[in-house]
Image (cartoon, rainbow, N blue to C red):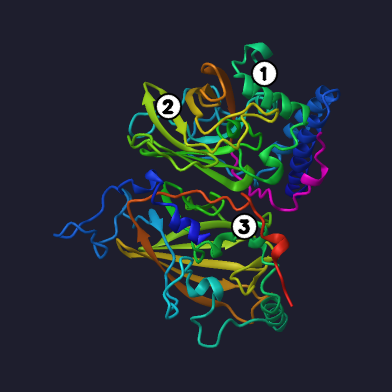
Amino acid sequence: MATLLLGAPAPAQWLNYPTPGIPRLANGKPNLNAAAPRTAGGKPDLSGIWAWEDNRPCPPEGCPDAHIGQEFLNIGWSLKNGLPYQPWAADLVKARRAANSKDDPQSRCLPRGAIRIYTDGMFKKILQLPGEIVILSERDASYRQIFTDGRPLPVDPSPSWNGYSSGKWEGDTLVVRTEGFRDDMWLDSQGSPLTSAAKVTERFRRPNFGKLEIEITVDDPKAYTAPWTIRLNQPIVLDTELLDYICAENERDTPHFTAK
Amino acid sequence: MIYIARRMIYIARRMIYIAMTSRKTFCISLAAVAVMLTTGVASAQWDPYPWKRVPRTPDGKVDLNAPAQRTRDGKPDLSGFWMPEDPVKYLLNLASDMKEEEVPLKPSARDLYNKRIDNNGKDHPGVSCLPSGIPEKDNIPDGLKLVQTEDLVLLLHESRTIYRQIFTDGRPLPKNPQPTWMGYSIGHWDKDTLVVETIGQNGRTWLDMRGLPGTEALHVTERFSRPRIGHMDIAVTIDDPEAYTKPWNVKLAWRLEPDTDLIESICEENNRDPGHMIGK
């Protein structure tokens, strides 16, 4: 998948369209440390194409093309004591690992959901609009909406992969609350669960032009003994555009999954 | 309530496929599909959340007959939640306003088309949860939310939770586009009409459910105009010299679905269609 992604750009001309408004250094290179742009309303503008943090060491023979970050494998890898699984959830993750994660919903082309699209090897494009933020993901050319028009979360939301999201600004931080997830979601490829009891809070900051910080707090008492918080650092991607990846296209994986 | 409505959409979709499987029961199934879609879709959205910044009649409803609003840069504002005015007509047969012999199919394309019809459309990409191309996507009766900015028009389609970007920042069409399911779209304003050109589709999508073909040479022009808040006209030109002897036109229309928003729809969830498709 990432192989495709990285292999494709050369002949695909539209991936080389220049991003407007890049702050530049004296030598003409993008100044990633410049101040973050702001919208007409004065808030930081989170708009842009964002990638995942490549924070996993490479083997001595070099990095493979499909080099996803630590959080894709274990979303709680940065936590000293790991994720605070409920006993059943710890057993489930153990069983999923033993089964080579063959029942991962994404293996059957189901969505990765609101959180997991940050950690997979695909680009996201954030569009900050009046009253809402849209996050486009290359994965199945899918989108997620975050309403910023002050609406409350619905009382009885229809369970979904993205949940229902409402955000508001606290200073220069966009605080997004999401509820209404499905019961059968995986947060990473080892199968850390997310359930319909989950309340997720994301805090978005753009400390400079080149960087997006997303602090994610998961409060899911059904699956975890305590709320936990991680921080993702996402680098900006310039002079390109999203390229659709359709999972169901020529999908031949399913019969080949093996487990003990 | 939402669950029931969702199920009804699935059933309606299944019925479209069933409609394809028998030409004798076609009309009956079609009528049933229309009923299912109308009842299903209307209640399938989130709890109503009233839109802001739209003109309303004294009873509080969105004034569908008011003239279209304008954006800050003076363009007509095309944004809103839209549904195909006729939920099935152009989805089933994009050329339904033409006589069969008027569709300028090249002989090879006519053979392919006839084969698809004889085969009950069982190989339509949607059966395997693959995306619709342009213009079929305009006719999917699950509706879409159109978002308009100065340099981008974004179509958020409910079905498949899939997006389409139309770049309106003045860039040209790419010369050698990477073929994709929905192609590459740019748009410009011709007075109050948004003219959208799309190339770079992968030739695997069908123009409708009966199977009018399109190839990688397909060049689609959509002219969007909004004469009043509640209505969108889309004049479509199909230009595909590999499949058709000359360009041909079809007029589509959308109606506004006020005070609602998108609900997630994932085709791969429990898709059980493929095993039930019957063809030769």
Q: Position of residue A144 (x, y in %)?
A: 54, 53
Can see residue B60? no
Can see residue A215? yes
Which residue is denoted by mark 3 in the rendering?
A111
Residue drawn at the location 31% of the way across and 62% of the way down:
A210
Front residue of A205/A192: it is A192
Instruction: Describe the element under mark 2 as helix, strand or loop.
Output: strand
Report the amino acid beneath label 2. Leu
Report the amino acid beneath label 3. Pro
- Between label 2 and label 3, give the one nearer the viewer: 3
Magenta residues: mostly which secondary structure? loop
**As displayed, is residue B95 above or below residue A172?**
above
| Residue at the far front in the pictured view | B108
Query: Is label 2 on the same chain as label 3?
Result: no
Q: Which residues are magenta?
A: B259-280
Q: Position of residue B248 (x, y in %)?
A: 54, 17
**Residues tagged 1 and 2 counted as in contact (Cβ below 8 A):** no
- Marks 1/2: CA–CA distance: 24 Å
Give the chain letter at badge 3: A
Which residue is denoted by mark 1 in the rendering?
B96
Q: Is residue B2 left or right of residue B58?
A: right
Instruction: Describe the element under mark 1 as helix, strand or loop.
Output: loop
Front residue of B187/A134: it is B187
Tell me the number on the disc at residue B194.
2
Query: Is label 1 on the same chain as label 3?
Result: no
Say whether residue B275 is magenta. yes
- Marks 1/3: CA–CA distance: 35 Å
Give the chain letter at badge 1: B
- Marks 2/3: CA–CA distance: 33 Å
